[in-house]
Each structure stands twice: as C-alpha cells, then as structure tokens.
Image (cartoon, rainbow, N blue to C red):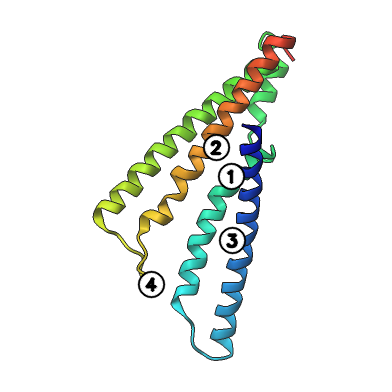
Amino acid sequence: MKKIAYVYNKLEEYVLVAALAVTAGMLLYQIIMRFVFNNTPSWTEESARYLFIWMTWMGTCAALKDGKHIRVELISSALIRRNRLIPKNVLEILVLLMWLCFSVFLAVSGFQLAYELAGRNAVSASMRIPLQFTYGAVPVSCGIVTLRLVRLIVLEFRKLLKGGAA
C-alpha cells in the first residue's frame, strides 16, 4: 500500500509541474501571437484556465500530503489554551472530521454537477470540450483529499491510543 501511495504522490507532483509548464508555455505563446502577429488564438486562454482549475484543486491534495494546507489555527489554539480538558489529539481529530465532512460534501456535490453537465452535453465556448471534464476536478481532488484525511484521522487515533493526550 505504501508503494502505491508513493507512486501516486510522485505522479501527482510530476503532473502538477508539467501542467504548470504547459500553462506557462501556452500563455507565452498567446502573448507572442497577440503582440507580434496580432492574432490571438482563443484556445490558449480557455485551456490555460481549465488547466489552472485542475492545478488548483489537485494542489490541495499535494498541500495536504505535505502538511502545507492552509488551516485556521486560531480556534484550535484558543481552545487548547483555555480548556486543558480537551487533549490536542482529540481536538485535531475533531478538526480533521469537520474537514472530512466538508470534503465529502464537495466531492458529492461536484460529482452531481459534473453528472448534470454531462447530461446536458454542456461544452466549452472555444474548444468545445465537455465541461464535465473541467468540473470533474472538484470531485476527483476532494475524493483524494477525503482518502488522505481518513489516513490522518487514523494516525491521530493511533497516537491518542498509544501515548494518550499529546
């Protein structure tokens, strides 16, 4: 299982870097075409926008994996300081459970939206690609975030059971 996770994590990193390079290349191409040849291709802006959407959502997965995801620590740190009855591990589990619920909600809602767009045969304006591929970034990334959050919750439970409150 660790080998699969390692391979996926590396693949995720390479795909994110490649997507960033492709986006930068497309935007550079668009700038050159606009200012040098006075002919702006419409597909570059749209494809860069859709790649950026995927990079943003998949970046949340990578940030969570590396422990670099933005979190609001104000409430949890205030609760720890004021209420010594709640162990830090328990509070961390509660925060992760709330995040898990939100991630599952986003994954389900995103899937429903993508499914609805597929049913309507909605396509993008310029490139005419099905919009469910763009909106599919939300359920895919939130599904991955959900799996990673479940893993983190299990690890926090193990810490709590092994060493008590930390």
The answer to whether 21 is drawn above or below residue 6 in the figure is below
* Mark 3 vs mark 4: in front: 3
Q: Are marks 2 and 1 in contact (CB under 8 Å)?
A: yes
Q: Alpha-carbon neighbours of circle 1 within 10 Å: few (<14), some, or many (≥20)?
A: some
Which residue is at a point 46% across and 68% down the rendered structure image? 46
Q: Nearer the viewer, residue 73 or 93?
A: 93
Q: Are marks 2 and 4 in contact (CB under 8 Å)?
A: no
Please, what secondary structure does the residue beneath circle 1 have? helix
What is the three-letter code of the residue carrying label 4? Ser
Image position of 152 (left or right of 121): right
Q: Are marks 3 and 4 in contact (CB under 8 Å)?
A: no
Provide the residue designation for mark 4: 126
Where residue 67 sits in the image (x, y, percent)? 69, 37
The residues bearing labels 3 and 2 have C-alpha atoms spaced at a distance of 20 Å
Which residue is at a point 50% across and 64% down the rendered structure image? 49
- The extreme bottom residue here reads 37
The answer to whether 132 is drawn above or below residue 161 in the figure is below
What is the three-letter code of the residue carrying label 2? Val
Where residue 90 sits in the image (x, y, percent)? 63, 15
Which residue is at a point 65% across and 37% down the rendered structure image? 3
Provide the residue designation for mark 2: 145
Provide the residue designation for mark 3: 19
Q: Are marks 3 and 2 in contact (CB under 8 Å)?
A: no
Image position of 149 (left or right of 47): right
Image position of 109 (left or right of 164): left
Q: Earlier in the sequence, mark 3 or mark 2?
A: 3
Provide the residue designation for mark 1: 60
